[in-house]
């Protein structure tokens, strides 16, 4: 069946509601996506039919629960082209996945004189964990500079990398500017220098086909809640030998091999990194989200989002008071558009959009250093997903006009006559 955003909106009851008396227009999927009925049903079904704790349960429910969780792990592996399910660790979110690598791998393998390379685009979740690791190990943090358009070039990355670079951690797509990075080439550069590469896939995996083996990524972190799945679940993919070399950051039940009063040995990955009772219902239901995305088709989703972004850029560029941030070259953009209107505060802009039922995100988007570098306090951000339509872009255009009218942007200042 061909891709139809209009048809699949039927699966998302929330998109049928109104907000402030207007039909909801949801342009905030980069923060978290909505979930279709199929995923909500899978969560309910877990609790209604299969709920039990996993790990060596011998009763039927425990076996069913474990089978569902492990089936999702296998599906996740297949979805990102990972060689086997054991390379998939369930965490709480992208943030925890990156912290797990920083602490579990970094503390063991880095020392004074080593360098950790990031880009200037990174979300705080792919920055602060490395800052902490650098402080703990004596390693140095370095950054690939971005152009004024928020682009990371291969030349800039090559120049920033040195013989001491041990880890290059970068986002595949910027959550604040929409820039798409040349992932495969950046990973190859890191490998040339003998460094590992961690890809923050929070904004990529939900929107584009992912193949960790074609990329040769060492680690990939992403969040199911941004791709129709449940909140409270994160994914870390890691090459087997690297996961094997890592220490857990949480210890306790579920991650051990053998325990004595004075010591313990740890299980093999991925269970070594999954101490305590995980988000079982979430993990089980994530499989339904993957099924949904695969049925829609990742290439079709990408093409659909590109068309919406092209239209949104047209609408934004038509207003002279609007400044669009991020790449001028549309082929370097994903489904995120960041903008400012004259010198209005993004929060004011967001509030007027909200009055129109249009949900956009405003602020620094967890990228304070980048905003500082670009000389802005923040932006308004519209982000698109498979269920958005051209009508949503029209609502964005109406919102823009409303903001301009509300704040009298572009109107000549009134001249008051003195008597
Ligand atoms: N990295 C990027 C690029 C993101 O966009 C986000 C969330 O917006 C994160 C990391 C953090 O994701 P989470 O809050 O699910 O940990």
Image: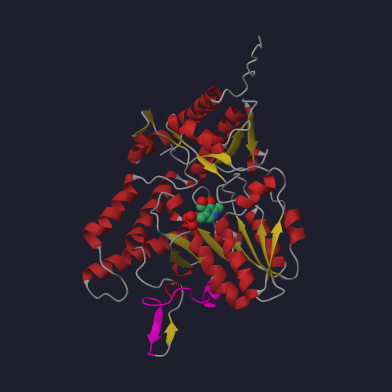
Q: Residue at x 63, y 35 (%)?
A: 324
Q: Where residue 242 appears, x then y in whole percent?
A: 56, 73
Question: What is the quadrant of the N terminus in the image?
Answer: top left
Q: Where residue 374 appears, x then y in whole percent?
A: 68, 45
Q: Residue at x 48, y 28 (%)?
A: 395
Q: Where residue 225 appears, x then y in whole percent?
A: 43, 52
Q: Residue at x 32, y 74 (%)?
A: 55
Q: Residue at x 57, y 73 (%)?
A: 105
Could you say which quadrant of the image residue 266 lies in?
bottom left
Q: Residue furthest top?
A: 419
Is residue 202 among what the camera can see? no
- Does the stretch in magenta take in 256? yes
Question: What is the quadrant of the C terminus in the image?
Answer: top right
In this rendering, the answer to whether 361 lies above or below 279 is: above
Question: Which coloring applies here?
Answer: secondary structure
* Residue closest to the eye, 10 or 47: 47
- Does the stretch in magenta take in 138? no
In this rendering, the answer to whether 147 lies above or below 71 is: above
Total count of labels: 0
In this rendering, the answer to whether 240 lies above or below 117 is: below
Could you say which quadrant of the image residue 185 lies in?
bottom right
* Residue closest to the eye, 394 or 364: 364
Q: Where residue 250 appears, x then y in whole percent?
A: 45, 74
In the displayed structure, does residue 236 sit left or right of residue 290?
A: right
Is residue 395 among what the camera can see? yes
Read off the magenta span.
240-261
């Amino acid at each position: 069946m061909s891709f139809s955003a209009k048809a699949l909106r039927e699966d998302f009851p929330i998109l049928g509601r109104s907000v402030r008396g207007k039909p909801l227009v949801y342009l905030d999927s980069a923060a978290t996506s909505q979930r279709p009925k199929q995923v909500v049903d899978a969560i309910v079904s877990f609790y209604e039919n299969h709920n039990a704790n996993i790990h060596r349960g011998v009763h039927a429910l425990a076996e069913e629960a474990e089978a569902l969780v492990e089936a999702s792990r296998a599906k996740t592996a297949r979805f990102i082209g990972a060689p086997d399910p054991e390379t998939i660790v369930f965490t709480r979110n992208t943030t925890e996945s990156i912290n797990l690598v920083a602490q579990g791998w970094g503390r063991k393998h880095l020392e004074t004189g080593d360098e950790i390379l990031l880009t200037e685009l990174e979300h705080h979740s792919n920055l602060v964990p490395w800052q902490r690791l650098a402080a703990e190990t004596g390693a140095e943090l370095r950054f690939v500079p971005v152009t004024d358009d928020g682009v990371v070039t291969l030349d800039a990355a090559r120049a920033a990398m040195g013989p001491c670079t041990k880890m290059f951690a970068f986002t595949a797509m910027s959550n604040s500017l929409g820039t798409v990075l040349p992932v495969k080439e950046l990973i190859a550069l890191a490998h040339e220098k003998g460094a590992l590469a961690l890809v923050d896939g929070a904004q990529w995996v939900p929107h584009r086909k992912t193949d960790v083996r074609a990329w040769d990524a060492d680690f990939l972190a992403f969040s199911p809640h941004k791709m129709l799945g449940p909140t409270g679940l994160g994914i870390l993919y890691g090459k087997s030998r690297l996961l094997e070399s890592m220490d857990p950051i949480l210890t306790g039940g579920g991650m051990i091999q053998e325990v004595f009063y004075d010591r313990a040995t740890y299980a093999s990955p991925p269970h070594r990194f999954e101490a305590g009772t995980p988000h079982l219902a979430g993990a089980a239901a994530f499989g339904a989200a993957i099924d949904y995305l695969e049925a829609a088709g990742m290439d079709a989703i990408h093409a659909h989002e590109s068309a919406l972004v092209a239209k949104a850029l047209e609408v934004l560029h038509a207003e002279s008071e609007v400044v669009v941030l991020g790449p001028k070259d549309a082929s370097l953009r994903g489904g995120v558009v960041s903008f400012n209107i004259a010198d209005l505060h993004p929060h004011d802009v967001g509030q007027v959009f909200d009055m129109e039922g249009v949900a956009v995100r405003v602020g620094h988007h967890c990228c304070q250093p980048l905003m500082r570098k670009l000389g802005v306090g923040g932006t308004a951000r519209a982000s698109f997903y498979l269920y958005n339509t051209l009508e949503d872009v029209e609502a964005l255009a109406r919102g823009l006009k409303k903001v301009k009218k509300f704040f009298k942007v572009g109107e000549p200042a009134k001249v008051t006559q003195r008597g």
